[in-house]
Image (spheres, rainbow, N blue to C red):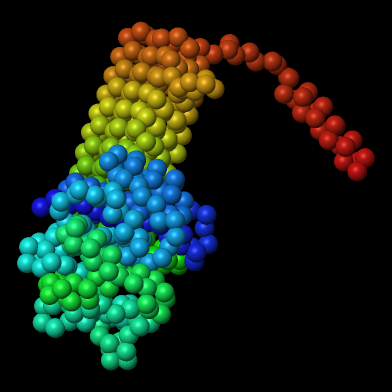
Amino acid sequence: MSIALVILAAGKGTRMESDLPKVLHPIAQVPMLLHAMRAGAALDPQEVVIVAGHGAEQVARVAQDESETARIVMQTEQLGTAHAVDQAREALAGFSGDVVVLYGDTPFVQPETLAHMVAARAKHDLVILGFHAAEPGRYGRLVTEGDQVQRIVEFKDATDEERQINLCNSGLVACDAGLLFELIAEIDNDNAAGEYYLTDIVAHARKRGLSATAVTCDESETLGVNSRAELAAADGVFQARARADLLALGVTLMAPETVYLAQDTVIGRDTVIEPNVVFGPGVTVESGVTIRAFSHLEGCHVSRGAVIGPYARLRPGAELAEGARIGNFVEIKNAVIDAGAKVNHLSYVGDASVGARANIGAGTITCNYDGVMKHRTTIGADAFIGSNTMLVAPVSVGDHAMTASGSVITRNVEDDAMAISRSKQENKPDRARKLFEILRAKKARRDKER
């Protein structure tokens, strides 16, 4: 069966107090919308339709960066969830298959749950995702008989008896595309909010004698985000779950609550992560790595046995081979550090290749930017770069070559050569004493004038 995703992402999120569309606020450094898109991607959808409204251009840009085939439709007026889904009618004209409706501000629905919904469609015309709420509060309630959902009632329209039900509506729906839009066409807005509720499709389906059932999931999967406080809470839920998963996979987190993970962080077993480490998007760490305290990694790949930090930063494009060592206050950007190479202290290596077993001395900088363009530095295997060397790119240092401490290297250094580029030292006898006398006298006059 072909699948189409319809993801509702039109809301402004007034309680967020933000110019950024609600669905673009990040959880685990990834916009909420992408959490929903990535969960739905597990169904291998033929169509992905994003219903946008507030900040549509921004929403479209993020969605289409994630999936070039995602189609954006507009909901210019927010008249309810059924009205929102109906905006996808034209985009899905001619589509034959099931539609799964997701919400861009409900980021934790799991791919397995969506797969269960699709599987249930084999036996039922309409599938609703429900959950048993510890505190049902103002959630809509699923009114059931046996395995059949008779109707969904919104809290504000529910009777006292119906409010005692703890099987609640998540809002997610799976239904044949043609049938879904037929049912939506029958919905009116005769309710307390004056909105067109998607939930009303259940009652209309039952009037036709069609089958409607509920698939249930853990309540945590249905967590929605409508405020900054809820955003922080949702991020906390993600972090706790992700840390627990890493611990179960054999990763050592010395202070788990201080490690911050991105949605797509991948870490291999027997890696040790010290306190206060932050992972941005796009990080893969292989097995047996040590990441020391207060390091920050994003967009990088770290191979087996590497040691990073403390206080190190790996930026996008950093590629560390096995056994590489990146020490304190070192920044690596768009650079390959080959096996066994060391950049141990106070250095910046950007737009560069560092050969196997090379040693980069403290205070080394690859001067990669000329104010307009970036240029590359190549350092050979077993090279030794002396402390406080400036490598002015484009430049290369050959295998087994050496630069003297304090050098500014502007020309290529051949294999096995030593490059020295610094001013000749001159010692001026008695000059320091005389200079200090002049400076102290000047300071005394200034202090007297005050």
Residue 283 seen by the camera = no
Q: Is residue 432 above or below residue 448?
A: above
Q: Specify whether 101 is left or right of 260.
A: left
Residue at screen point 16% across, 56% down: 98
Residue at screen point 41% across, 40% down: 313
Residue at screen point 40% across, 49% down: 59
Q: Looking at this view, name the residue that lies furthest to the left.
A: 123
Q: Nearer the viewer, residue 179 or 437?
A: 179
- Residue 156 in the image, given as x and y percentages of width and height: 38, 82
Residue 412 lies in quadrant = top left
Count of marks placed on residues: 0
Residue 246 lies in quadrant = bottom left
- Residue 177 in the image, given as x and y percentages of width and height: 19, 57
Q: Nearer the viewer, residue 92 or 414?
A: 92
Q: Looking at this view, name the residue that lies furthest to the right.
A: 449
Q: Specify whether 297 is left or right of 108.
A: right
Q: Nearer the viewer, residue 107 or 157?
A: 157
- Residue 229 in the image, given as x and y percentages of width and height: 45, 67
Q: The C terminus is located in which quarter? A: top right
- Residue 79 in the image, given as x and y percentages of width and height: 41, 65
Q: Looking at this view, name the residue that lies furthest to the bottom.
A: 161
Q: Is residue 128 above or below residue 77?
A: below
Q: Nearer the viewer, residue 181 or 211?
A: 181
